Image (cartoon, rainbow, N blue to C red):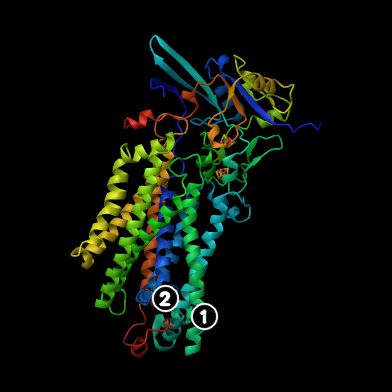
Amino acid sequence: MVSNVTYLANVVHPVQLGILISIYFFYTGLSAGSFVLSSLGTVFGIQKYKPIAKAGVIMAVALLAIAPLHLIGDLEQPQRFYTLFFRLNPRSAISYGTFLLTLYPLNSLIYGWFLFRRDFATGAQELTGLRRRLYKFLSFGKTDLSAAALAKDAKIAKFLGTLGVPLALLVHGYTGFILADIQARALWHTGLMPLIFLMSAMVSGTGLLILVLMFSQRFLSPERAITPERKSLLLDIAQLMLWFIVVDATLMIIDFIMLYFANTAGHAAAQLFLYGSHRTMFLGVEAGLGLLLPFIITLLPKTKKSLGWIGFASVLTLIGVIAMRINFVIGGQQLPLSGDTLNPYTADPKHLMMIGIFALLEISILYLTFRFLPVYGLPQEKVQTKLQHPAVFRQ
Amino acid sequence: MTEKKRRWAMVIDLRKCVGCNACTVSCKIENNVPEGVYRTWVKEIEKGDYPQVTRFRLPRLCNHCDNAPCLAACPVQATYRTEDGAILIDYDHCIGCKYCMAACPYDARFINPVRKTAEKCTFCYHRVEEGLLPACVTTCVGGARVFGNINDPESLVAKLVANNPVQVLKPEMNTQPYVFYIGADQNIMGARYDNLEKGE
Ligand code: SF4
Ligand code: SF4
C-alpha cells in the first residue's frame, strides 16, 4: 500500500446510530436473559430455579416494555413509527424485529399471568385492602383453585414458556443480526454477531437478576430477608453467570482473531479495539471490568460464597455489557467507509435525557411490580397454610 | 431483439476533473441541500513526496446500485427503485431510522437536518424526468461528468464504459454501482486506515 497519501478534502460523516440504540440493545439483552433464566424452572424443569421464575418473567416484560421506546426516540420522525407494522420490507431485518418486539412481550405477559394466577386467586380471597382488590382484578375472575385448575395453569405456563424461549432468543439474536446483516461495516459483518449478543445478553441478564433478587428479597418480599435457601440459590445463579462469561469471552476472542486476519477493514477494526483509541473501552471496561473481574470473583472460593462480592460482580457485568453495546454499535460505525479518520460521534443531550427518563421509568416499574405483585408468594400472616406447599409448578 | 430497459448511469472521467467543486455547489442550489451535508462532493488527496507528487480527485455521489443494501435495509419501503434504475427516497414515508445510512457502504446518505428524513443524490430525477441532465452534469466545467442510459449503445455513457478501463467503488461489496469512474486512483476510492493504526 502506498503510504504517502494525504487527504486534502472530504466530507465528514458522523455516526448515525448512537447511544439510544446501544442502550436499546442493552435492555433487550437484559430482557432475553431474564426470560431464559425464568424458563429454567418452568420449561426445563430444573427444580431449584423455580423460585426465580416469577421474578425473571417480571423483569423480562418490564424491560421489554421500555426497550422499544429507545428505538422510537431515536427516529427522526417518531410520529411515523406505527407505519413499521404495515409498510413491510421482507428484506429488512427491522421489519421482522417489529413483530418480534411485539409478540415476545405479549407472550411473556400471558406466560407470567399463568405463573401468578394461583397467587392472585388466593390473595383475592384471603387478603384485605388494596392488595385484595388488585389481585381480584388481576385474576380476571379466574379464581378456581382446584388441583386440576392449577395443574392446567402449570401446563399452559410450560407451553407459553417453551414458546417464549425461542422468541427471547430470536428477539435478541435478531438485534445482533441487524448489525451482522450490514456488509458495509467490518466490525459487524460476522456470523458470530448474533451469538455474541445472545451470550452477553445472558451475562447481563443474570447480573441484573441477581441484583434485583437481592434487593427485592431483602426489602420487598414477605420475609424481608435473604433466607439461607435464597442465598444458596443466588450463589448458584452466580455460578451460571460464570459459565455465561466463559462462553461470551470465548466468542469474543474467536471474533477478534477472525477480524485480525480478515480483510483491510476487519483488520483495522481489530487494531482500533486492541491497540487504537478504543482500547480502554474495549480491553479495559468491556473485557477487563465486565468479564475478567466478574469471572475471577465468581471463580475464587472465597469471593464466590459472598453475597457482597457476587453483587459487585453483577454490577460489573452490567457496566461491561453497556460498554460492549456502545463499543460495537458506535465503534462499528466510527471506522471510516470513505475517509481516513474515525467518524465522529457526539451524544445528543436530548438522547441522554431520554435514556435517563426511560431508566427512571424502568426502575419505577420494577419497584412497583416487585412491591405489589406476589413475586415471592403472599404476605405470610394471612395465608400461612398456603405457603406450606408452594409446589404448584412442580408437576 | 427487444430493446433493453432504460438504466440511468453516470460516468465520471477523472482525467477531465479539475476539482473545482462546481458540481458540489450546483447540487446544493438545485436540490436545496442544507448546510453541512452533501449529496455530491469531491474528495481530494495528495500522493507521493515532493517533487514526485500528484493530486487526485474523486467526485462522490450515490451509486444508484443495482444490488442496493440501502434498499434492502429500509423497513418501511421509503427507499425505492424507479423503473430506470435510480434509487430514491419517499420523504413522506421515511421514518428516519437511519438503518440505510449504516447499510450504505459509500457514505452516500445523510439526514436532512431541516426535513428530518434520510436524503441522498437522486440523479436529479426531477430534471431527468423533464428531459434535462442532472445539475452537476450541466455545470461540470471540464465535462468530466456524463449521464445517460447505459442500455442504449448509442449513448455517451455506454460508449465511454465500453471503450475505457472503468472502475466502480468497492466492487467487493457486490452492490453493482452505476457510477463508473475513468482513471480513479485506488488510494482515493475507499477508506484509508493507516492514520487510525498510528493510534489517532
Ligand atoms: S450508493 Fe449507497 S445510497 Fe446509493 S444506492 Fe448504493 S447503497 Fe444505496
Ligand atoms: S432512514 Fe428512512 S429511508 Fe433510511 S432506512 Fe430508515 S425509513 Fe428507510
Quadrant of the drawing holding the N terminus of chain B: top right
Instruction: Please tell me whether residue A367 is drawn above or below residue B33 in the rendered image.
Output: below
Q: Residues within 10 Å of mark 1 (few under 14, many from 20)?
A: few
Identify the subunit bearing mark 2: A
Q: Residues within 10 Å of mark 2 (few under 14, many from 20)?
A: some
Q: In the picture, residue B29 is in which quadrant?
A: top right
Q: Position of residue A306 (x, y in %)?
A: 21, 67
Q: Residue at x 79, y 31 (%)?
A: B3
Q: Residue furthest right?
A: B1
Q: Is residue A258 left or right of residue B37?
A: left
Mark 2 beta carbon near ligand 2 (under 8 Å): no
Give the secondary structure at mark 1. loop
Q: Residue at x 37, y 28 (%)?
A: B194
Give the secondary structure at mark 2. loop
Identify the subunit bearing mark 1: A
| Label ID, residue A140 | 1
Q: Is residue A104 left or right of residue A119?
A: right
Q: How many marks?
A: 2
Specify which label sits upstream in the sequence, 2 or 1. 2
The amino acid on which the numbered mark 2 sits, given as a three-letter code, is: Gly
Instruction: Please tell me whether residue A40 is drawn above or below residue A118 in the rendered image.
Output: above
Q: Is residue A288 left or right of residue B130?
A: left
Q: CA distance from mark 2 to mark 1?
A: 28 Å
Q: Nearer the viewer, residue A123 or B64?
A: B64
Residue located beneath label 2 in the image: A45
Mark 1 beta carbon near ligand 2 (under 8 Å): no
Q: Residue at x 44, y 78 (%)?
A: A116
